Image: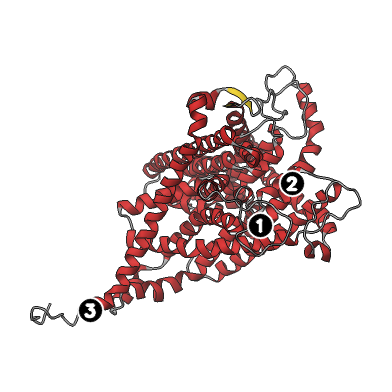
Amino acid sequence: MSAPDPAAERLERFAVSPSRRRRDGGARAAVLACTVIALVPLLLIVYYLLSKGLGALSTSFFTTDPTGNTFFKNASIGGIKSAILGTIEIVAVASVIAIPIGVGVAIWLVEYGRSSRFAQTVRFFVDVLTGVPSILFGLFIYIVLIIGTGSSYAGYKGALALTLLMLPIVIRSAEVILQLVPSSLRESALALGAPRWRVIFRVVLPTALPGMVTGVLLAIARAAGETAPLLFTAGATLKTNFNLGQFMNSLPVQIYSDVTSPTAAVERRAWGAALTLVVMILLLNVIARVISRRSRIA
Amino acid sequence: METTPVPSGERSILERSPLARLPDRVLKYGLTALAAMILALIVYFFFRLVGEARPAFEKEGVLGFAFRNDWDVSAEQFGALPLLLGTIITSVLALLMGVPVAVATAIYATELCPLRLRAPLTVLVDLLAAVPSVVYGLWGIFFLAPKLQPAEQWVADRLSFVPFIGGGVATIPNYFVTGLVLAIMILPIVAAISREVMTTVPSDHKEAALGLGATRWEMIRMAVLPYCRSGIVGGAMLGLGRAIGETIAVTILIGDAPQLGHHLFGQGYSLAAAIANEFGEAQGLHRSALFAAGLVLFVLTLVVNGIARILVLRAARGTQVKASGGSAPGAATLAAGAAAGA
């Protein structure tokens, strides 16, 4: 061998020692492995939803109500029409109530309350609402509207429970977006002599709109998948129903009751209903993402 | 500034008429009332819940209700310890399994993975949050639990000398499966918040670590993780709150056995599961006991979220001193993350 090259020797002194290099490689491999592990459940869920759910889908699956015949082998168990329509009705009513109130509170927090003590209290309580388990919203509506009035389950009561669930999500996401509206925009409008309400409606809201739509769609997607608040407010039923004062079926509740009393056919219906629900929620998520990408702020 | 003298009783041209200012007033006070209404609603809810739970607390005593191990509906005995412990066991299991994986995913996505993979990876992990809890329950009970049962039995037999884990017969619904599914459910929240916080680490810090000769992993361990500790702890606590309150997936997976499970792979119960499972048929004292369970659940989530807040604030202050200049990831990021993750 030739004489040691001084440059290589100097490099040698700065090289990472084998033990450190091993630890680096090991840690990187572990992090990668964990990431793969995190994705495995998603793949499995998607795979089972498709492989079991697709087989359940047919035209009659979407156009007939569940029959409740789960014990007799040859009787038809029916489809999930009432559940799909019920979910759409309940979530639509909940959105119509929750979105204006939620956006209103967010506007108040950003434009009027700012960092006053009262605004901080409201923020704190909204955070509290975010942490409340969803089944408690169902219990609250039960106490107020079912024990309180002595009546039974109804679609609008389920919608109100979902409203409570959506409110903190709408408020928080709208507030974050409204805060991103540059204050120079507000100041220019005010300096031009516009009154405050006009600044809010003509300058602040249009700027923030795409971002707020994203938050709102995510809140709707969240509400559509909730079972617990509906169990003791909207109830479960078989028939399609457009009267919000009556029991109303919904997809999550239908899946839950199918899971808890399964025969092979009912289990298949549960997978089909789950696939339908997940596709509806994913569509909302995809639309939300597309809109948020178009947004100028955030 | 030049002002034209205004005769008393008349307005300056710069001032608006009271009529023109009306919409402003209406908007301001209307919105204030709306915000106040939310406060009132929560306070009202709390007192109504306490009122409905009172009969159960009067019979059992508050401590007796929470810490007596006897939940027997037919005998009207309502000691909710099996429910409370079931909630705690499954949530802690979820944290133990979910948080390390979630943090690792965040590290991989922000520090190690090729740039082109970052966005798809983020979207995929976020997709886990879009799956409704009833679907997790469905998947868990028909796929995961039956598949895992032989392995669980094997572990229980091998570790028969370890209390709580070993011995016993592994049933299909059990604490472990519930904890595992909860871990999957909290993963996207914890990962999203950790990721958000990790992107706020100033690149100066990372470059300084690398420039001093640190390996990638040493850079992550010494520059990234200490800076993010507050955010990660906060994210984990938010995940814990979510796991405690999770109802439907737990109801399907835990087995709804109203006694204290004797081992990890046995059936149990949780507060939320008891409400979901029994409330429909509950009458009188039983219903009151379930409201009391709801109240305990409410207080538990409040305490967890409160601790999260305190920890985050304290840790954020700590990072601010260490990381002079760079703005520490604090409550604002968390709030945004919570809104997105929720």
Q: Amino acid at mark 2?
A: Leu
Rendered image quadrant of residue B104: top right
For badge 3, the amino acid type reads Ser
Q: In this rendering, is residue A207 above or below A257?
A: below
Mark identifier at residue B138: 2
Pointer 1: what residue?
A248
Residue at (55%, 71%) from the top-left corner? A294
| Disc 3: host chain | B
Task: Give residue B28's position: percent from left, percent from top.
Answer: 33, 65
In the rendered structure, find residue B338 and report the number of the disc placed on it. Answer: none
Q: Secondary structure at mark 3?
A: loop
- Where, quadrant-wise, is the N terminus of chain B in this rendering? bottom left
Q: Are marks 2 and 3 in contact (CB under 8 Å)?
A: no
User: What is the distance, in whole Å, between disc 3 and disc 1 at their CAs?
Assistant: 51 Å
- Going by the image, does B239 lie left or right of B321? right
Taking the image as drawn, is residue B202 in sight? Answer: no
Q: Nearer the viewer, residue A180 or B90?
A: B90
* Residue B98 visible in the picture: yes
Q: Position of residue B201 (x, y in %)?
A: 48, 50
Between the residue at mark 1 and the residue at mark 2, the CA separation in whole angstroms equals 22 Å
B290 vs A219: above or below: above
Q: Residue at x 41, y 43 (%)?
A: B316
State the residue lying farthest toward the top: B161
Tags 2 and 3 on a common chain:
yes
Q: Position of residue B154 (x, y in %)?
A: 80, 27
* Residue A289: percent from left, percent from top: 60, 65
State how far apart marks 2 and 3 are (Cα): 63 Å
Secondary structure, mark 2, is helix
State the SS at label 1: loop
Q: Is residue B210 above or below residue A107?
A: above
Chain for numbered disc 2: B
